[in-house]
Image (tube, grey):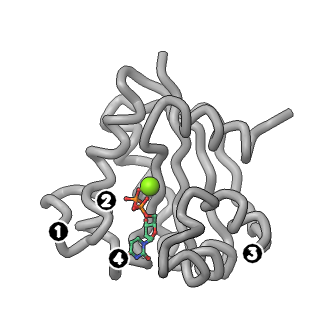
Amino acid sequence: MEQTLSIIKPDAVERNLGDEIKDIFIKNHLKIKDSKKIHISKEEASEFYKVHQSKPFYDALCSYLSSGPIIVMILEGENAIKENRRLMGATNPKEAEEGTIRKLYGISIDKNSVHGSDSLENAKKEINFFFKN
Ligand code: UDP
Ligand code: MG
């Protein structure tokens, strides 16, 4: 079974949307294998989002991800990476399809409620980043 990393971002945790978002995964056959609520530092956020270091939004993105508690989860299921991305919807909530998490809950392109790994390689890296033991 494939695994992917999901993050419920500060804007959604702050609005107590954790359980509602988890329900969407469960109803769509993605098992939550592990979950924890944490508050990361800006340094950790900068490491996590390193792939975006050349982007103009990088600094704001790292400040934002470290601005409050987040819920990090390992999701498992058939095609979990693609399926999670489908359930999340487009990066910009305004462009996200009806019924997707970002359409339902996203506030803006930066406060878009969830993160999901985009490839098998990144899923492995990102799971290891938060759940290495
Ligand atoms: N982001 C942003 N402004 C942009 C593009 C992206 O603030 O113009 C943020 C947004 O929170 C997004 C994250 O950077 O979720 C990572 O961007 P990516 O293109 O990887 O989007 P995602 O994979 O999250 O859909
Ligand atoms: Mg991405």
Q: Is residue 115 left or right of residue 129?
A: left
Q: Residue at x 52, y 48 (%)?
A: 6
Distance from disc 4 to disc 1, alpha carbons, whole Å, reads: 10 Å
Which residue, given by chain and number where applicable, does mark 4 sit on? 109
Q: Is residue 50 left or right of residue 77?
A: right
Of the residues under marks 4 and 2, which one precedes in the sequence?
A: 2
Which residue, given by chain and number where applicable, does mark 2 sit on? 101
Task: Tell me whether the residue at label 4 lies in contact with that at label 2, contact meaning CB atoms closer than 8 angstroms.
Answer: no
Q: Which mark is residue 95?
A: 1
Indicate the amino acid at tag 2: Ile
Q: Residue at x 49, y 73 (%)?
A: 55
Which residue, given by chain and number where applicable, does mark 3 sit on? 42
Indicate the amino acid at tag 3: Lys
- Residue in front for this viewpoint, 74 or 128: 128
Q: Is mark 2 within 8 Å of ligand 1?
A: no
Q: Residue at x 34, y 81 (%)?
A: 107
Of the residues under marks 4 and 1, which one precedes in the sequence?
A: 1
Q: Residue at x 69, y 75 (%)?
A: 66
Q: Residue furthest top?
A: 1
Whether 97 is drawn above or below 30: the answer is below
Of the residues under marks 2 and 3, which one precedes in the sequence?
A: 3
- The secondary element bearing badge 2 is classed as helix
Distance from disc 4 to disc 3, alpha carbons, whole Å, reads: 20 Å
Whether 72 is drawn above or below 70: the answer is above
Indicate the amino acid at tag 4: Ile
